[in-house]
Image: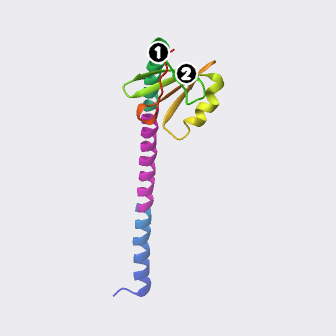
Amino acid sequence: METKYEATLRELSAAQKEISSLKQEVKRLKTELATTEKTIDEYRRRLATMEQVADFRLMSLVEMKGEEVLFNGLGTALMAENDGRVIFKVPAELADKARRLFSKVNRNFLDGAQVVYITIDRSQLSLETRKG
């Protein structure tokens, strides 16, 4: 027959094995989490690169075929559209106003020396086109 002391030792030994097993599981999960985070970061970098390529294509389009539009009463800008994305070529002096104007929508700013390019989904805009 097992004494109370022996039973406590046996339970303690079993608990120590369980703790050791749980520590190994935590270590494995941390490693898995780190790997997953690296994968997510890589996918984010790839997505950003793809979005920039699309934006650079739009930049070429606005340079070649942009039409002048009234830029929300701030002045005029060149605008082009392709596949549901719109790009504006805005003079640098309007950049701060443009940032405030588009602060609550999903957009991308590409800053140049004398101009700012703003890309945005067409569905988020209301445009008034003015032939120049």
Counting residues from the start of the chain, the first of labels 2 and 1 encountered is 1
- The residue labelled by disc 1 is 60
> What's under tag 1, amino acid-wise?
Ser
Residue 66 included in the magenta stretch of the image: no
Q: Nearer the viewer, mark 2 or mark 1?
A: 2
Q: CA distance from mark 2 to mark 1?
A: 15 Å
Residue drawn 44% across the image and 22% down it: 53
> What's under tag 2, amino acid-wise?
Ala
For the record, the magenta segment spans 22-45
- Mostly what secondary structure, the magenta segment? helix
Q: Position of residue 61 (x, y in %)?
A: 44, 16
Residue 77 - label: 2
Left or right: 30, with 113 as reference point: left
Of the 4 image quadrants, the one containing the N terminus is bottom left
Left or right: 71, with 47 as reference point: right
Q: Position of residue 96 (x, y in %)?
A: 64, 31
Q: Is residue 24 above or below residue 104?
A: below
Judging from the image, what secondary structure is the residue with disc 1 in?
helix
Residue drawn 40% across the image and 61% down it: 21
Q: Nearer the viewer, residue 45 or 93?
A: 93
Extreme-right residue of the structure: 93
Proximity of marks 2 and 1: CB atoms separated by less than 8 Å = no
